[in-house]
Amino acid sequence: MSDTDGKKPLGLGGGRSGHVKQSFSHGRTHNVVVETKRKRVVVPGKPAAGGGGARAGSPSAVSGDPSKRPAGISDAEMERRLAALKAAKAREAEEAAQREAEEKAREEERERRRLELEAKEREDREREEALRLKAEEDERRAREAELREKKKAEVRAKPAPEARPAAPADRAAAEAAAARAETKGVSSTGPRKTDRDRDVRAPVADDRDSRGKGRDDNRRTGKLSLSQALDGEGGRQRSLAAMKRKQEKARQKAMGGNLRAEKQAREVQLPETILVSELANRMAERTPDVIKSLMKMGMMVTANQAIDADTAELVIDEFGHKAVRVSDADVEQVIDQVEDKPEDLQSRPPVVTIMGHVDHGKTSLLDAIRKANVVAGEAGGITQHIGAYQVKTESGALLTFLDTPGHAAFTSMRARGAQVTDIVVLVVAADDAVMPQTIEAINHAKAAKVPMIVAINKIDKPAANPQKVRTDLLQHEVVVEAMSGEVQDVEISAKTGQGLDELLEAIALQAEILELKANPDRPAQGAVIEAQLDVGRGPVATVLVQNGTLRRGDIFVVGEQWGKVRALINDQGERVEEAGPSVPVEVLGLNGTPEAGDVLNVVETEAQAREIADYRIQAAKDKRAAAGAAITLDQMLAKAKADESVAELPVLVKADVQGSAEAIVQALEKIGNDEVRVRVLHYGVGAITESDIGLAEASGAPVIGFNVRANAPARNSANQKGVEIRYYSIIYDLVDDIKAAASGLLSAEVRENFIGYAEIREVFRVTGVGNVAGCLVTEGVARRSAGVRLLRDNVVIHEGTLKTLKRFKDEVKEVQSGQECGMAFENYDDIRKGDVIEIFEREEVQRQL
């Protein structure tokens, strides 16, 4: 091996790792050049004759024939050198990766130090800026204090003005007045003021006049009499607060100067928005000072302008007070949420709701329990309202019953009955079994999670089958005790009174299991079962007290209304002073008619009740506005386009109670389809008034009165304006009439009746008429008044009417099957031999909803 650079051969010295740089052939020997960082080594290989065999310099070539290796190098030495070369390459790659990682770490360290330095410089700048601002503020305050001291010194050093002598005319007038007083017997007991005294007081008066602020403490109004002038009596006197302020100023002056009272730090309740004047009032600061503070912030505001909570909080902090954020909904926190202690709870009567299908005997059952004729007072024997009654059993136990209507339109009223109840009595007729409203009652009871008692009524009838009722109830997951279930079932007859004692015993047992308790010694809370507008008594609400005791004179808030209890009337029509838990009463004294289902809460003051009601009214308005604003422009256009194709029947509904009005509206809104619908313009409670007639006239709508009548002015107005008023007492008739009226708005359905076919045998050209088809009626009959379609290869190419239908030379009305005739189409001449004419008639059929 030879070293071309004159250095040691590779592997013979302490050289660093190297790599193969290039290979070349010299004569018959293939040499390999290995270049390291310090030297260049040529490793001789085997001869390269013929270019065959192993590649020169490879381990196989070196470890081959000893005669072909370089002189003096054995196989082991060559393998050792190659292994050293490979290890040198690995070390170099490892060192390069290590250097790269170190460089990356140094770069990250430099970046971190740069960021830290920038943050530190920014903090230093901010600190210097804060110190500069503080120094400027201290300097400004010092200048202001110095200026104030300078002004005070100037005021103290200012000499008193010279006294001016009294005018001779004024002195003469005073002497004349004193002479007249002596002649009339008026004596002046006070010491007479000398000219010197007047001269001493004159500068003070002149100084007050020069400032424009001088006012006599004893200013007089009206005529000035001589006695008032001499005695100083009468006139407007100072208020007590002004006298106290004057005394306080005098006391402070005597103690050594004007001492300002220590400023109090207040907690200011801050809503989401607040008026500037209200903010100043809550901070007990002057409104101009608050406006000045806001102007320094760049806000040009007035006293009656509203500002947001963040800005107001900055102002509060500047004046040294503490802001307490409150929400508008916090006004409802005054509603007493008392945690009842176990020792305060007392047993209360259970609230039992009678539910079931229409005409299954619910009201008759309650009538038998109350021993009162309730059914006679209902229109058509159907319960239209929710009734609440309290019954005392023979054992002395009190039970509160709610009677809900069974008609499908009163689903929402039954739902309210289930929400306030403790026990549901499901009445099922033994001769009618389970019906749709029975299923709804079961669902309401399950949704309210209240226990149920099944009362199988009308077992005295011959067709009664109680076992079928029990079996049908299994389909709705109601398993009675007779079929190894947990639901109590009692067979009763409301007509004969059979089984009523067992039913009351079952109710008492279920109430005992529930352990119903309430705290009567707390502000009352209850649910509105029904509400109505009485002509003589105003808004009246039937309230079921759930907790606490409602007393006459209590101030309450219910939904969006508030009031003061003027009278409480129980289910017997008697006035009572208070109503405890589970007692239903009629409440008088509301300022408006609440919604059935609203919660009544007693509050302490009238202001709190009014504030809560106002908040709820505003929240309802905001909710309606948000719902209207949520509609996009595309949706509004699509809705307007859809409304153009939908016929509407507008109606105006007035009912006797709120629950009935809501139920009627829900029933009417379900009437209609894609072509016609019923739109309720307005619904309310109470008699029909002139304003209702005016709205109905403007909209062209009838007025629907449910258990109410129009007053005399409204009737006269309706007769003059031609507005129709319809009265109803049964909801069946109301819904059926409205459905029939809405059906009249439906477009008639057009049906086509096929009456015959004719085949064109020949086409003739007639002057003044056009092409005339010579036809043979192959099926049915051809009529002059019927519609026709021209078929060519079973494809309709024209539809229209006939211009002429002739039999020989005569114009005829119809041609029977098997006869020939001539036909000409109206405004169409493209007819050919072999075409087929289809004859049909159209019929309009009135549709029903």
Image (tube, helix red, strand yellow):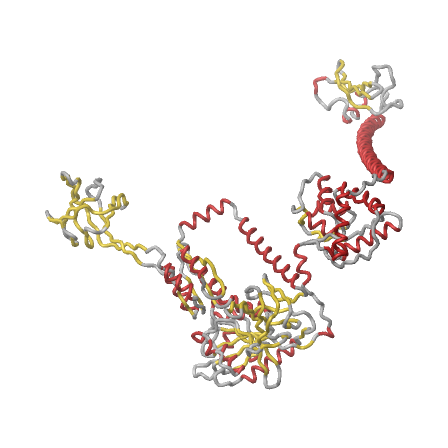
Which residue is nearer to you in this view: 771 or 759?
Answer: 771
Q: In the image, 673: left or right of 37?
A: left
Q: Residue at x 65, y 46 (%)?
A: 305
Total numbered badges shown on the rendered structure: 0
Seen from this angle, which residue lies furthest front? Answer: 183
Measuring from the top left, give residue 218's x and y in whole percent: 75, 53
Q: Quadrant of the C terminus?
A: bottom left
Q: Residue at x 73, y 24 (%)?
A: 54
Q: In the image, 560: left or right of 663?
A: right
Q: Is residue 108 visible?
A: no
Measuring from the top left, give residue 361's x and y in whole percent: 48, 78
Q: In the image, 320: left or right of 817?
A: right
Measuring from the top left, give residue 272's x and y in whole percent: 67, 50
Q: Is residue 436 visible?
A: yes
Measuring from the top left, give residue 459's x and y in whole percent: 48, 82
Q: Residue 555 lies in what quarter of the image? A: bottom right
Seen from this angle, which residue lies furthest top? Answer: 27
Which residue is nearer to you in this view: 769 or 609?
Answer: 609
Q: Residue at x 79, y 48 (%)?
A: 320
Which residue is nearer to you in this view: 197 or 386?
Answer: 197
